[in-house]
């Protein structure tokens, strides 16, 4: 649905994007994770060409945006919704007026606009608030208006620019739940950028990790967790690095209730001390990471057994 | 001088001032608003950056702003004659008043438009809005409280300018104050004129403030 190839963006001598390839499949929620200054905001703004990349191409829904003239680009942008960290609502308009704005831009007749606005406010849980001014709303409600506005033209793609970063944790949860619901109900493809691992864990099917203008790692969350030594695994399940000598770090995916550890102790007669670990519920299922020291018994056979069971094993030197 | 003698002088003078200020405000709005928009749109990082256009506009506005009004008024007499056909009377002075106020108002428009958040403009761009739509439906409505405040300041400045115009044959309250108050030592008339001007300015300013506040939803 979104395909960016060889994206570079220079501001004078500063390189914001240093050759980025990004692929987001239809119907998935893809998160770009990175510290501020990593280039993720520039990347997002290159997708709808708010920033024109210095080099590279961006294709959304099969259309190469970088090849379009201004008029065609404006038309193509109507198929790409965007929500913003600070909501970017028009203070001169009511809630309904804000949601109607993109419809006005598209030339939708008034009666049709009013019908659609009511429908959209319903969809985001703001029924009956159409006549309010944005300054009367809470942050979460403002973002709901932003989402309704972004969806007005039935876009195939939604871009989210740190949409929950200005919200408190409970409101963040509710906005993320809304995005997830829209993704499921409307088949909306969502590309979001965030610096919060929480957002990635809660809603994303796949992720790209960005640093210094490059994507360091990209793929489905489950796949990345199954990849030994992946950055995502280290960041979701933080354990002290480097691992102490002689320790073994186990990454479990799939059913977290399977009693692998107690099976191990019974079958192989090993002593097992746990140094640290955690289990996380992810959008794609649960996963856990455990650092242990195995002693005595048949430690080598025990590791082979774990590997057999699909556990990813990293042995410290 | 008694009240019966003053009233027939004060009323026409007030009407003349109102005419001069009213017409020049209208023309200032018609010319200054687009000029202010052009200053913002053509600026670096604007909707359509055009450094050369921006430099020329900025220069013209600064020239207009750097001339003392009384000098400007005399300097553009030929233009006034060309436009109105005469250089005295209330109508004639609408020309220098407008020319004097346009650069002033354009700068205030520029400031008000700059207050509109870049994120709001970008949100509109992301929706595929054209530049004209962004100016019409985002920049101007969002800046409206600031534009009203700017126009109020401009009207008050025009009342001040119009008093100077009065001394050169434009009529109005300024002319009255100079001819009767100053040249004929009619102190009471002078005081009444001053009070009247103060009241007019106060009323206009507070109306403008109230309107700007009502329009603001920040």
Image (tube, coloured by chain):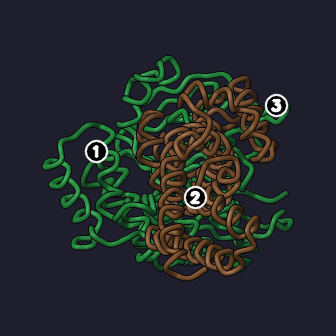
Q: Which chain is green?
A: A
Label 2 to label 3, Cα distance in Å?
58 Å
Q: Is residue B28 left or right of residue B130?
A: right
Task: Looking at the picture, tell me which residue is in the foreground, A254 or B84.
Answer: B84
Label 1 to label 3, Cα distance in Å?
37 Å
Above or below: residue B203 compared with residue A157: below
Q: What chain does badge 1 belong to?
A: A
Residue at the disc numbered 3: A12
Could you say where residue A213 lies in the image, as x and y percent from the top left?
73, 40
Label 1 to label 2, Cα distance in Å?
51 Å
Q: Residues within 10 Å of mark 2 (few under 14, many from 20)?
A: many
Could you say where residue B135 lies in the image, as x and y percent from the top left?
48, 41
Q: Callout 1: helix, strand or loop?
A: helix
Q: Callout 3: helix, strand or loop?
A: loop
Task: Looking at the picture, tell me which residue is in the foreground, A218 or A151.
Answer: A151
Could you say where residue B174 lies in the image, as x and y percent from the top left?
65, 61
Above or below: residue A230 compared with residue B3: above
């Amino acid at each position: 649905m979104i395909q960016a190839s060889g994206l570079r963006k220079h501001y004078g001598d500063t390189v914001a994007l240093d050759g980025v390839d990004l692929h987001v499949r239809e119907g998935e929620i893809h998160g770009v994770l990175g510290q501020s200054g990593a280039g993720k905001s520039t990347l997002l703004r290159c997708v709808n060409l708010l920033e024109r990349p210095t080099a590279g191409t961006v294709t959304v829904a099969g259309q190469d945006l970088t090849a379009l003239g201004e008029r065609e680009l404006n038309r193509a942008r109507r198929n790409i919704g965007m929500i913003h960290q600070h909501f970017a609502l028009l203070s001169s308009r009511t809630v309904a007026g804000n949601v109607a704005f993109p419809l006005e831009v598209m030339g939708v007749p008034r009666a049709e606009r009013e019908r659609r606005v009511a429908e959209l406010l319903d969809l985001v849980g703001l029924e009956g608030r159409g006549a309010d001014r944005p300054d009367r709303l809470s942050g979460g409600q403002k973002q709901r208006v932003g989402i309704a506005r972004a969806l007005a033209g039935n876009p195939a793609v939604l871009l989210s620019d740190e949409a929950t970063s200005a919200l408190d944790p409970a409101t963040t949860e509710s906005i993320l739940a809304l995005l997830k619901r829209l993704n499921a109900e409307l088949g909306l493809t969502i590309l979001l950028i965030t610096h919060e691992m929480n957002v990635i864990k809660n809603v994303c099917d796949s992720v790209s990790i960005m640093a210094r203008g490059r994507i360091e790692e990209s793929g489905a969350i489950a796949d990345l967790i199954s990849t030994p030594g992946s950055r995502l695994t280290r960041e979701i399940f933080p354990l002290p690095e480097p691992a102490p000598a002689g320790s073994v770090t186990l990454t479990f995916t799939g059913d977290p209730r399977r009693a692998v550890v107690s099976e191990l102790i019974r079958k192989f007669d090993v002593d097992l001390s746990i140094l640290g670990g955690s289990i996380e519920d992810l959008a794609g299922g649960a996963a856990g990471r455990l650092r242990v020291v195995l002693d005595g018994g048949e430690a080598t056979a025990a590791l082979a057994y774990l590997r057999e069971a699909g556990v990813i094993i990293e042995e410290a030197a | 001088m008694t009240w019966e003698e003053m009233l027939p002088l004060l009323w026409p003078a007030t009407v003349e001032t109102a005419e001069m200020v009213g017409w020049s405000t209208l023309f200032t709005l018609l010319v200054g608003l687009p000029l202010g928009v052009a200053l913002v749109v053509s600026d670096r990082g604007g909707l359509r950056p055009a450094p050369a256009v921006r430099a020329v506009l900025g220069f013209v506005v600064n020239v207009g702003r750097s001339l003392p009004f009384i000098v400007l008024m005399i300097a553009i007499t030929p233009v006034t004659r060309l436009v109105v056909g005469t250089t005295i009377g209330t109508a004639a002075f609408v020309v220098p008043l407008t020319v004097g106020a346009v650069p002033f108002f354009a700068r205030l428009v520029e400031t008000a438009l700059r207050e509109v958040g870049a994120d709001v403009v970008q949100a509109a761009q992301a929706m595929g809005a054209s530049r004209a739509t962004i100016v019409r439906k985002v920049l101007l409505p969002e800046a409206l409280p600031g534009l009203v405040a700017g126009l109020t300041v401009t009207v008050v400045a025009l009342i001040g300018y119009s008093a100077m115009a009065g001394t050169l044959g434009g009529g109005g309250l300024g002319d009255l104050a100079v001819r009767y108050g100053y040249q004929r030592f009619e102190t009471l008339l002078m005081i009444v004129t001053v009070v009247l001007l103060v009241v007019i300015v106060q009323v206009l300013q507070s109306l403008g403030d109230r309107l700007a506040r009502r329009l603001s939803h920040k």
